[in-house]
């Protein structure tokens, strides 16, 4: 993950903020300027729900640079209780115990680091409730 992207997404990642459309109520993560459901430009930033469920998931066995020391690991599409959907790594559970519908909560954890002296990226990881 590039330093500029980490900085640009800091509020969504560090504060668990989502964009809520003032027109139709659709939730967007990360927050955006225009609602893709209705096209409104009236968006508010609100706190994301803390819990949700796994909609689908996959096991990563050939990781991109910076994640090779974590394989195998699970990445899931998660629907939070407020309707927000996001992708996050699932932690603290054996791969064979992950299933669709698994209840999770988001925790703020270290995601990766760029080298020994590089930027440390923090963000969401999903853990079982």
Image: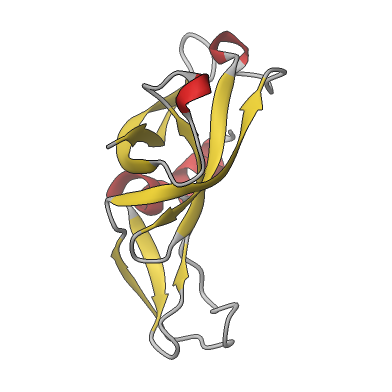
Compared to residue 79, the image places residue 125 above or below, namely above
Spot occupied by residue 28 in the image (x, y as percentages of width and height): 48, 67
- In the image, taking residue 127 as reference, residue 2 lies left or right, namely right
Front position in the image: 24 or 30? 24
Front position in the image: 25 or 59? 59
Spot occupied by residue 45 in the image (x, y as percentages of width and height): 33, 69
Q: Residue at left 55%, top 21%?
A: 73
| Residue 20 visible somewhere in the drawing | yes
| Residue 119 visible somewhere in the drawing | no
Total label count?
Answer: 0
Q: Residue at left 40%, top 22%?
A: 93
Q: Residue at left 52%, top 88%?
A: 40
Front position in the image: 80 or 39? 80
Q: How is the image coloured?
A: secondary structure
Spot occupied by residue 61 in the image (x, y as percentages of width and height): 68, 18
- In the image, taking residue 33 as reference, residue 83 lies left or right, namely left
- In the image, taking residue 21 as reference, residue 2 lies left or right, namely right
Outermost residue on the right side: it is: 62
Q: Residue at left 32%, top 44%?
A: 14
- In the image, taking residue 51 as reference, residue 39 lies left or right, namely right
Picture quadrant of residue 43: bottom left
Compared to residue 98, the image places residue 7 above or below, namely below
Image quarter (top left, top right, bottom left or bottom right) of the N terminus: top right
Image quarter (top left, top right, bottom left or bottom right) of the C terminus: top left
Picture quadrant of residue 122: top left
Compared to residue 50, the image places residue 126 above or below, namely above
């Amino acid at each position: 993950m590039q330093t500029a992207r980490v900085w640009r997404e800091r509020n969504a990642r560090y504060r668990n903020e989502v964009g809520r459309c003032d027109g139709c109520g659709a939730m967007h993560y990360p927050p955006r300027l225009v609602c893709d459901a209705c096209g409104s430009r009236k968006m508010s930033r609100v706190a994301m729900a803390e819990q949700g469920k796994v909609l689908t998931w996959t096991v990563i066995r050939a990781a991109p640079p910076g994640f090779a020391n974590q394989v195998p690991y699970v990445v899931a599409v998660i629907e939070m209780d407020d309707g927000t959907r996001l992708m996050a790594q699932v932690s603290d559970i054996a791969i064979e115990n992950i299933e669709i519908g698994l209840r999770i909560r988001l925790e703020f954890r270290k995601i990766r680091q760029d080298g020994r002296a590089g930027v440390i990226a923090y963000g969401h990881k999903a853990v079982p409730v």
